[in-house]
Amino acid sequence: MAVTVGCHHLPGGGSGSGFKPSGLIHGCHFCSFHHPDLLSVPPTSLFQRSHSTPCLLSSASTDDDVASVMIVGGGSAPGIHALVAEAAATMAFGACPVPSGTGLGSAYFLEDQSGDCVAVVKPVVIDDNEQLAFPSSSIRACETGAREAAAYLLDHGTFAGVPPTALIRISHHSFPPARCVASIQRFVPHDCDAGDVGPSRFSVSSVHRIAILDIRLLNTDRHAGNLLVKKHRIDNNRSFEGGDITTELVPIDHGLCLPELLDDPYFEWLHWPQAAVPFSDQVTEYVSKLDPFKDAELLRTELPSIREPAIRILILCTIFLKKAVDYGLCLSEIGRMMTRESYRLEAGESVLETLCKKTEETIEAESQLSDNDEVDFGEGDERKECQFAMDCGDEDKLRIPLLLSKKSLDPLQEEEKEERGKGMMMKSLSFSARELNCDGERVQRSKMISFKSKSEEEWKLFLERFEQLLPEAFEARKRMKMKLRLGSSC
């Protein structure tokens, strides 16, 4: 296979990123596109390739035997160009991607000449745009790579520690299609994963930081297997077995975050003792500075393949998180409000889902009153029909509005009714019990809430009414927690 890597010289005799040109190497260029649809456009004067870093796209050949790497999403994030350049150089020296051999998804390691792993590449399914990543998921398999990149983009200041990740198009004979879209993530040396170490080893700070990201992205697959553990020895004169050590958690595998429906998240950390500890001032300050609408614009610009319903889930969950932290709720309380409770192997609605439905009720009732010229709704208006009965499981008290119960809430159902059962990708290592009932059947996605059909005005009104209902829901959660404490002390 003809593989070349070169360095395009910059004015003044410098080079793009420190790679010295060889006499046997000819000009190859590094491409960075913000939209995958532009990948088929041949290089012209209108599409100038980046001169900043080398890569493996030959300017003279497009044959499948020429390895190439091109950034197609998330390229503006820190460290991405350096990561891709290093991966490209590794392939240029003849390294072949090595299958990971673990997990249920396809992942490949890129190793340098010393045998050290540089990056992890995960090809995504691109032959069927409607194929789902998992039977009960609302995430298409072809969009899991974009979500991997989104997690790094949204981890501002590497607060949670997501390794540099981007969406690329890579050409190499090792991959099933010679040219494919994939996510690339910098490999993080680690000792084990969280499943091999008890949670008592983890710091409160690291758990809280990762959990904040999971809540914002409504991560449906945060299990112990995708939390890497790096051990740091405190006493250099003693071994790990005999000396004190600290552990660092590194979150990976974010392909099943940002669902298009209000799905049931899976948070491994929910029952860890760290989740009951109040947030530190540093975490509280970080959350207060989060801007869900700015994050939404970032995704629309950098990763346009992520659809609007998923972006609205990000906005909703970030608003919910910010208000909950500001109200003084701890991590376990927030996580439980977002997670469906199971009774006798049957999953009930989460508090977040109930809030969304009651928001629709409020808007519908307000609209009916407006039609009768009797609307009188303000921030100080205490409406009894919006009261929460969170201490009671009687579903009769929840009036499902006509618009939510009349027809399926699943916007993907009609699009995928012929394809959703074919060739599903499984989760990386495990999945939560929520996807299966006692008979192993799929959870009905048609009952999940979607914001796809809302206009911008309707979405804005929904968020306004949603925020108005939050204080009452948070207060009810605090009262319930107090009752549980009093009951356990008796």
Image (spheres, rainbow, N blue to C red):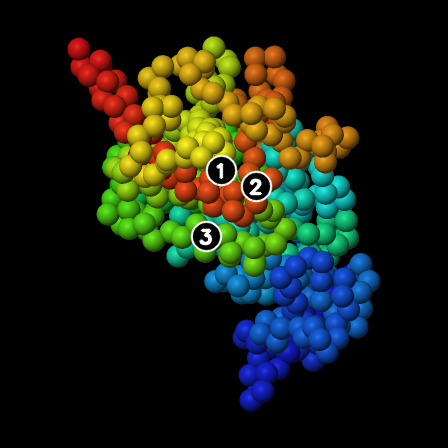
Secondary structure at numbered mark 1: loop
Contact, mark 1 vs mark 3 (Cβ under 8 Å): no
Please state if 388 lies on the left or on the right of 422 as rendered.
left
Secondary structure at numbered mark 2: loop
> Is residue 48 shown above or below 458?
below
Query: How many discs appear?
Result: 3
> Is residue 132 shown above or below 459?
above
Q: Nearer the viewer, residue 59 or 341?
A: 341
What is the distance, in whole Å, between disc 2 and disc 1 at their CAs?
23 Å
Q: Residue at x 22, y 13 (%)?
A: 487
Q: Give the mark nearest the N terminus, 2 or 1.
A: 1
The amino acid at mark 3 is: Phe
Residue at label 1? 219
Q: Position of residue 471 (x, y in %)?
A: 31, 34
Q: Toward which corner of the image does residue 32 lie, by quadrant?
A: bottom right
Residue at label 3? 293
Q: Give the mark nearest the N terminus, 3 or 2.
A: 3
Contact, mark 3 vs mark 2 (Cβ under 8 Å): no
